[in-house]
Image (tube, helix red, strand yellow):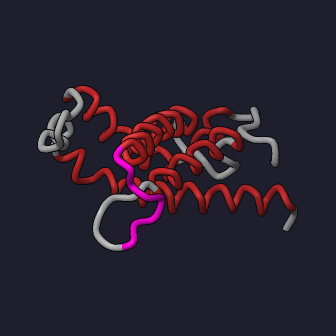
Amino acid sequence: MNSAHRGSIAVLLLRLVAGVALMFHGWGKIQNPFHWMDKAPAHPPGFLQALAALSEFGGGLGLILGLLTPLCAIGILCTMAVAVYTHVSRGDPFVARGPGGSYELAVLFLTIALALLFTGPGRYSIDQKLLGGRRTNDYD
């Protein structure tokens, strides 16, 4: 197995695991996309709540399929950047020690989205099939 094949498998695994996790993370939000944060003080407008729900749930599905990967990654990256900012501005720790919020998961999803923006969706993706002979990353 050559390094390009191993790299494509690694990106596929990253997309699959992150995509499933994001879909679970966004499932409750997509059930009520315009009002899932309404109980939070100074909650964002419904439109922004819906964008975040769509970025998490729809972006996760896009990662699983390898479909519109750059668009999905940008949506996830923006949503997680806001989540990190919100946690940091509240004084939440990186890793919670007991009850309370933390921003480790948001940083992890942000980093995965950034990595997928840099690498592309890999050989085993719908994006690759749609692009035909064009390369979707540098390791193939």
Q: In what quadrant of the picture does the N terminus appear?
A: bottom right
The front one of 58 and 103 is 103
Residue 19 x %, y %: 46, 54
Specify whether 38 is left or right of 126: left
Residue 58 in view here: no
Q: Residue furthest left?
A: 39
Specify whether 38 is left or right of 27: left
Q: Residue furthest front?
A: 91
Residue 128 x %, y %: 65, 41
Q: Residue furthest right?
A: 2
Specify whether 79 is left or right of 18: left
Q: Quadrant of residue 133?
A: top right
- Main secondary structure of the magenta stretch: loop
Identify the residue shown where x is 76% and y is 58%.
7
Specify whether 3 is left or right of 57: right
> Was residue 130 drawn as part of the magenta stretch in this picture?
no
The number of numbered badges drawn on the structure is 0
Magenta highlight range: 90-97
Identify the residue shown where x is 41% and y is 37%.
82
Residue 85 x %, y %: 43, 40
Q: Quadrant of residue 58?
A: top left
Residue 138 in view here: yes
> Was residue 96 drawn as part of the magenta stretch in this picture?
yes
The front one of 96 and 123 is 96
Identify the residue shown where x is 30% and y is 63%.
100
